[in-house]
Amino acid sequence: MKRIIWTFWVFALALSALWLFADTLWPAQSNYFALRTVWIQYSGVLAIGTMSVAMVLATRPAWLEPRLNGLDKMYRLHKWLGIAALAAATVHWLWAQGTKWAVGWGWLTRPARKPRTAADSMGSIESALRGWRGLAEDLGEWAFYAVAVLLVLALVKRFPYRLFAKTHHWMAAIYLVLAFHTLVLVQFTYWAQPVGWALAMLLASGTVSAVWVLLGRIGAQRTARGVIESLQAYPALNVLETTLRMDPGWPGHRPGQFAFAMSNPKEGPHPYTLASAWVPEDRRITFITKALGDHTRRLPERLRVGDRVTVEGPYGCFTFDDEKARQIWIGAGIGITPFIARMKFLAQHEGQDARPIDLFHPTSDVDPQAIEKLHADSQAAGVALHLFIDKKDGRLTGERLRAMVPGWKDASVWFCGPTAFGRALRADLLAQGLEPEAFHQELFEMR
């Protein structure tokens, strides 16, 4: 989390600093309209800048994922940038439209335009852009309304993921409209200064990314096909285990990673954690999915052995890499999935990781067959399994964890499960002396 927090603030402050080298928030002409002009420019630059970076992240660039510590963190940064862009765009819109309303209501009087002199003559490029101002303003206003609606829908968790993915795709087209709006209306003198150079790079990268999205090329180079070999339902858990045999082209994966799987083009791809270790000789991968929404609830009815599935990935850096003397794993509910994959890997690579590992599995639902498999996986991997069934054992807390693992301060903690539960455990353990860098949390939220 710290890495994406720093990335967010460094970018926002750096772009603000570049703008301040070119302009000022407190113009020499101490009147409302002069102040309005600079605030419109600043908020506009900040809005399109953050939206440009968000657009680049939407393409899931493989080179950037390890630098931001995984696609889950990258998408969290994408979300923050989208919210920041909406906030800045709202300020931009209020300065522009609010002033027009105030003038129309007679609250403000717009100053008379100064006659243009020879010294004020514009070059051909600036003159051409000036001719597009009216169109750029109108398009920008309507694009803002569309962005506001789509971003609010993206933040509403009850809005189905399938519809979210389809409507969010439209953001790429709206971005191109806003890029045109910016190109025409940004202060022309900025282009000869560092803020203009930075803005040009942001607009160029955002435009290329938007076109890439509209062409449906996201993840195209990381996509392979597979066929469903088996389906195992666990009704008590509302969970489905699906095993695929992959065609050549799947590069393999590390335990803890996830992929986007698509069995129905109308539904589109959905992200699922991989619950298997990769063995090149048999080319099988396994997903364990829980019925958390309309799509996942219908999977047992829709999927059949022999169906073809498109898989994009792998993604993620929740891969258990550290130098600590021991590890503590916490897989809450369906968050157990990456740990199943890791246990299968350890069982196949005996002796590769001999340090002690404690696996905590808090769950409210129990299926005897699933629990039996979990016990078998933990024994084969040499992992100490601690089951916490809510009705029988109560809730797992930091205090109970510390009591059960005396050497917890020398361990790294790997958590996958409900975000709020992870935050509470992290706060407790850090308050008692765990190093912040030792707590790893999968932020498995793609919106």
Image: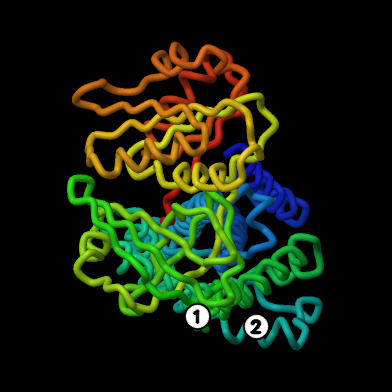
Residue 226 image point, x, y percent: 45, 74
Residue 274 in percent (x, y) is at 46, 55
Label 1 environment density (alpha carbons within 10 Å; few <14, some 14–19, many ≥20): few
The residue lying at 37 percent from left, 34 percent from top is 420
Identified by mark 1, the residue type is Gly
> Split into 4 quadrants, where in the image is the N terminus?
top right
224 sits to left or right of 19: left
Q: Residue at x 23, y 39 (%)?
A: 368
Does residue 125 sit above or below 414 in this rendering?
Answer: below
Front disc: 1 or 2: 1
- Residue at label 1? 216
Q: How is the image coloured?
A: rainbow
Query: Earlier along the polypeptide chain: callout 1 or callout 2?
Result: 2
* Residue 294 sits in quarter: bottom left
* Residue drawn at point x = 21 percent, y = 60 percent: 297
**Residue type beneath disc 2:** Leu
State how many labels appear: 2
